[in-house]
């Protein structure tokens, strides 16, 4: 048996919804690998899962989808990794490769996709099995806890820049400065973009300036110049409207989150001149490989706070109340 933190009933993070439990070791089937987990990042999506903001596929749920560990068993026919290789596991756990979305390179939109820590058991435990094709090699420059936030905050944050259509040298606004945005900012620096960071927290604005932000302020404050792209990492619909006001003609506003409060009504004049509002859903393996390739060329600074696995309920509460400095990671070795 292994230890796992299970959700039996969705409820507010105030009530410590994850329960320490013993579950059987998962079987390692054909094409799969067994991964012994050393670290697992905690993501805002985990808060939305435990509080029942997302419609859950069934109960109990074992959340956690930014997993780093080592391969400890190869299922029949698995040859992509070797025993003791270090791998990462992200939100996309499996896609059908048959549907129209999969056939068009958009497996992130696969209608039968399975997501880690949602449809299938996730990383708030000791071991996980996954099909070898959905695991990632982790760049050597990162230790386990530093690598964990790359797997969702990093990959999905990167897809958001792609969906917003960011081109090198453009002026890009990042709204909300948590785990995703601090990695996205460094990618934008790499692309020589001019970044404008909007956050309520002075601590976050300071970190943004240290990482190279051109300008920092709060949502609702107008930046000194009109933006080409705006990416929203905060789950607040009103910020979408404020970001539209910040964009010039042809500007794109992209929402990077899985859940957001309603977007208030706004005058058509804000959308006129080919401004565009869109959203990101999940990420493809190609996004993952491309992002990790950049992360291996240019060492990204992952700002993390490390906790023990038995502190997971406390971490979810801190995440919800925005009292974390940066990305939260659970570690077996602390
Ligand atoms: Zn599919
Ligand atoms: Zn996530």
Image (cartoon, helix red, strand yellow):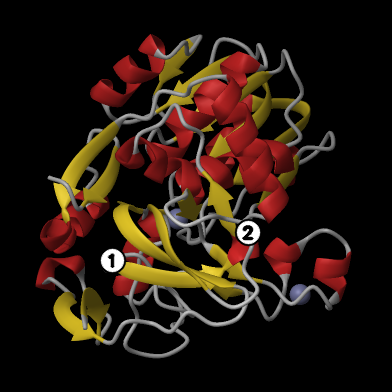
253 sits to left or right of 257: right
What percent of the width, then of the height, locates residue 26? 38, 82
Q: Helix, strand or loop at disc 1?
A: loop
Q: Helix, strand or loop at disc 2?
A: loop
| Marks 1 & 2, CB-CB < 8 Å contact | no
Per the model, the C-alpha gap separating discs 1 and 2 is: 23 Å
Position of the N terminus, as image quadrant, is bottom left
Residue named by callout 2: 281
Residues packed near mark 1 inside 10 Å, few (<14), some (14 to 19) or many (20 plus): many
Q: Which sits earlier in the primary sequence, circle 1 or circle 2?
A: 1
Position of the C terminus, as image quadrant, is top left
Quarter where residue 179 is shown: top left
Tally the marks.
2
What percent of the width, then of the height, locates residue 117? 41, 71
Q: Nearer the viewer, mark 1 or mark 2?
A: 1
Determine if residue 244 is in view: no
Which disc is residue 313 wearing? none
Residues packed near mark 2 inside 10 Å, few (<14), some (14 to 19) or many (20 plus): some
Residue ranking furthest to the bottom: 58
176 sits to left or right of 37: right
Determine the residue positioned at 68% across, 29% down: 229
Task: Out of 310 and 130, give the one closest to the viewer.
Answer: 130
Residue named by callout 1: 124
Look at the picture and state if 180 lies above or below 115: above
Determine if residue 97 is in view: yes
47 sits to left or right of 15: right
Which corner quadrant of the figure contains ligand 2?
Answer: bottom left
> Mark 1: is the Cβ under 8 angstroms from ligand 2?
no
Determine the residue positioned at 46% across, 72% down: 129
What percent of the width, then of the height, locates residue 264? 53, 54
């Amino acid at each position: 048996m292994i230890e796992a933190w299970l959700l039996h009933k969705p409820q507010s993070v105030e009530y410590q919804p994850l329960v320490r439990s013993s579950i059987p070791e998962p079987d390692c089937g054909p094409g799969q690998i067994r991964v012994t987990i050393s670290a697992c990042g905690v993501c805002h999506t985990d808060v939305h899962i435990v509080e029942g903001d997302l419609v859950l596929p069934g109960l109990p749920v074992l959340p956690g989808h930014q997993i780093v560990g080592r391969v400890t068993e190869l299922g029949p026919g698995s040859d992509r990794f070797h025993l003791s290789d270090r791998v990462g596991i992200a939100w996309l756990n499996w896609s059908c490769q048959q549907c129209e979305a999969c056939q068009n390179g958009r497996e992130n939109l696969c209608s039968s996709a399975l997501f880690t820590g949602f449809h299938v058991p996730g990383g708030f435990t000791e071991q996980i099995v996954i099909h070898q094709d959905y695991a990632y090699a982790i760049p050597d420059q990162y230790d386990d806890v530093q690598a964990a936030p790359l797997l969702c905050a990093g990959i999905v944050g990167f897809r958001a820049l792609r969906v917003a259509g960011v081109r090198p040298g453009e002026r890009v606004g990042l709204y909300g400065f948590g785990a995703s945005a601090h990695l996205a900012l460094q990618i934008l620096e790499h692309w020589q973009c001019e970044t404008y960071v909007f956050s309520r927290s002075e601590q976050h604005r300071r970190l943004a300036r240290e990482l190279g932000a051109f300008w920092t302020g709060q949502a609702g404050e107008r930046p000194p110049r009109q933006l080409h792209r705006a990416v929203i990492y905060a789950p607040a619909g009103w910020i979408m409207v404020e970001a539209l006001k910040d964009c010039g003609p042809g500007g794109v506003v992209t929402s990077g989150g899985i859940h957001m409060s309603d977007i208030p009504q706004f005058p058509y004049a804000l959308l006129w001149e080919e401004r565009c509002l869109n959203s990101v859903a999940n990420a493809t393996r190609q996004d993952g490989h491309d992002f990790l390739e950049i992360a291996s060329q240019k060492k990204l600074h992952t700002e993390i706070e490390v906790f023990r696995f038995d502190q997971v309920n406390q971490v979810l509460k801190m995440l919800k109340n925005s009292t974390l400095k940066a990305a939260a990671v659970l570690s077996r070795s602390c």
